[in-house]
Amino acid sequence: MESVASAIRTALLTADPRAKCFTTRSVARRWRKGDLAWRFDVEMPDTPAWPERPELLPPNRMPKRGKFGSERARIALWHSLAHIEFVAIDLALDMAGRFGAQMGEEFVGDFLSVAADEAMHFALLARKLESMGSFYGALPAHAGLWEAAYSTRHDVAARLAVVPMVLEARGLDVTPATLERVQAAGDAGGAKILARILDDEITHVGFGTKHFLRCAERIGTNPESLWQTLVKQHFRGAIKPPFNDSARLAAGLSREFYAEIAH
């Protein structure tokens, strides 16, 4: 029987976006069915396989989207969202494969379910782009999204603090405003996609918070203080309002974590 680590590594090293989605959802399904052995007999790659396009640029070289009302700006928005979800597939896979042996079966199951959700989100967004006459890879994309994973590859608490509890939590803050803009533009299909993503991201942040609290309990430290220390060490950006406090709280991420270090 193939090991869960081997199956995850295969998905991480699948470059084609459609194939990565298919492989990721297959790994999650096989795990749920008990068709993967509890073995961590291979290492995770430092960098996943990605397609040749989109061209990956530093944040300061990314072109401006322009006003939302133009077709070009709308395509740029959906392309940006698709790229975020594509990288999120690998973030969740790497979480399960890199730290699963240390954290246990529930942890692996949680983050494989996250990976499957992200693959579904990407597929929805890729189809959305195609319906607009574009495709994923047509525009350049942000190169820095994997940076948080690489910099925390040796510390599961740091990875949990930065990826689900900062990066994904930021999605809880900004998605409602994007959803309102899309609704105001009369795009009911796009609004439905964003509403589904928002609901799922609350669950994802909740998984990250749950396992972070267990890390803090295991080492006998205050979780809020530990989180603040790790974020200051490993996250280059700013924790800044406005915050979607209700969605964050639904995910278990109370203001006690982030209010003190917010800018």
Image (cartoon, rainbow, N blue to C red):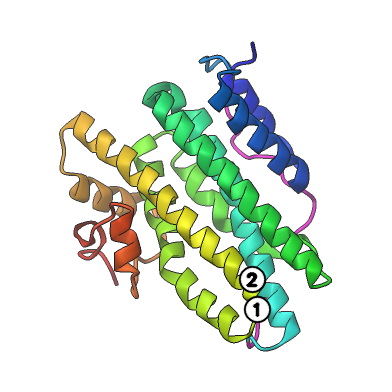
Compared with residue 172, is residue 178 higher up or lower down, i.e. above or below? below
What secondary structure prevails in the magenta region? loop
Residue type beneath disc 2? Gly
Q: Residue at x 79, y 68 (%)?
A: 131
Assign a secondary structure to mark 2. helix
Is residue 43 in view from this perspective? no
Q: Where's the C terminus, which quadrant?
A: bottom left
Identify the image quadrant of residue 78.
bottom right
Identified at 80% across, 63% down, the residue is 135
- Up-down: is 24 above or below 74? above
- State the residue lying farthest toward the right: 133
Disc 1: CA contacts within 10 A as few (<14), some (14-19) or many (>=20):
few
Q: Is 185 rendered above or below residue 142?
A: below
Q: Which residues are magenta?
A: 44-67
Disc sitting over residue 114 in the figure: none
Residue 152 among those drawn in magenta? no
Confirm whether the magenta stretch covers residue 45. Answer: yes
- Distance, label 1 to label 2, CA atoms, is 5 Å
Res 4 quadrant in image: top right
Residue under circle 1? 187
- Quick check: marks 1 and 2 in contact, CB under 8 Å? yes
Which residue corresponds to mark 2? 190
Q: Position of residue 222 (x, y in %)?
A: 15, 43
Q: Residue at x 53, y 29 (%)?
A: 97
Q: Residue at x 74, y 83 (%)?
A: 71
Left or right: where does residue 38 sit relative to residue 122? Answer: left
